[in-house]
Image: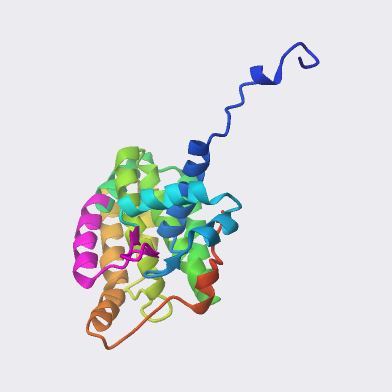
Amino acid sequence: MGVLGTSVGDLGFAPITRDNLTGRVYEELRTALMEGRLWPGQRLKIRDLAAALHVSETPVREAVMQLVRERGLEMQANRAITVARLSLAQYGELRRIRLELEGLAAAEAAPHSTPAVVTELEALHAELLATQQAQDWPGAVRANWRFHHRVYRTAAMPELLGIIETLWLRNGPLLNYQYPLAPPVYPGRHRHLDVIDAMRRRDPAGVRTAICNDTVEGGASLLQLMTEIEAGRVVIGPPQAAESLPFLPSTS
């Protein structure tokens, strides 16, 4: 019994079961994929992931298999686990889907926008610019995703957000190719500024258009790079340091 006659079992603590631990590992790996902390084709070893995340191998293995089923990770014939690669055709198809779903989320987010959301978006965009200036390419990929995710989360449509996040399990790692080889280029000002202005006005059509323009214009150089990769004229692999999983666990 406690001091006031309450036992520890009466304090409302939920036991940490293996399922809880697997879920936490899954969310960490899932976030790492969406934020681009892992590279396309990067090989992952259960033992190394367990050490990086300070857990046993069992919850890591279970979380990894869940991500294999969601196609964020792939299991090779020799049972090696790698981060999924996208072909040019797959990237193009997923981008068409993303334009529809992310455009919808952006439009739905606008009426829910507040000054606090706009301030957060401004800070995330400033972080993106700062990381680009510092040539912190992993930081830039991460800041870009967090900017977009904040918009989509504002829509208050959790089912839609979950679908978008699943698409980004495959899209996030690919954005590591963007910096510094294929950085976003816009014919005018940065489209994130258009997103911010439209969110400030709570303009659904404006936010949808700005998000879609950002995806198409900002990804044009990446699309060209992927064409070169598929033709065999450019070969890109994960940096040597990525083999030691430097981006796990998340610092957010």
- Give the total number of marks visible in the rendering: 0
For residue 41: magenta? no
Task: In this rendered view, identify the residue nearer to me: 222 or 205.
Answer: 222
Task: In this rendered view, identify the residue nearer to me: 94 or 249.
Answer: 249
Residue range highlighted in magenta:
73-101
> Residue 235, located in which quarter of the rendered image?
bottom left
- Judging from the image, the colouring scheme is rainbow
Q: Position of residue 87 (x, y in %)?
A: 24, 70
- Is any atom of residue 224 visible in this view? yes
Looking at this view, name the residue that lies furthest to the bottom. 233
Identify whether 236 is placed above or below 119.
Answer: below
For residue 85: magenta? yes
Q: Give me the residue at 23% from left, 62% from top.
A: 95
Identify whether 41 is placed above or below 68.
Answer: below
Looking at this view, name the residue that lies furthest to the right. 3
Q: Give me the residue at 48% from left, 66% from top.
A: 128
Identify whether 175 is placed above or below 34.
Answer: below
Task: In this rendered view, identify the residue nearer to me: 48 or 77.
Answer: 77
> Residue 97, located in which quarter of the rendered image?
bottom left
Q: Position of residue 224 (x, y in %)?
A: 26, 79
> Residue 10, located in which quarter of the rendered image?
top right
- Image position of 2 (left or right of 225): right
Q: Position of residue 25 (x, y in %)?
A: 50, 48
Q: Position of residue 50 (x, y in %)?
A: 55, 55
- Is any atom of residue 205 visible in this view? no
User: In the picture, which quadrant includes the N terminus?
Assistant: top right
Q: Give me the residue at 36% from left, 73% from top.
A: 184
Q: Give me the residue at 50% from left, 72% from top.
A: 242
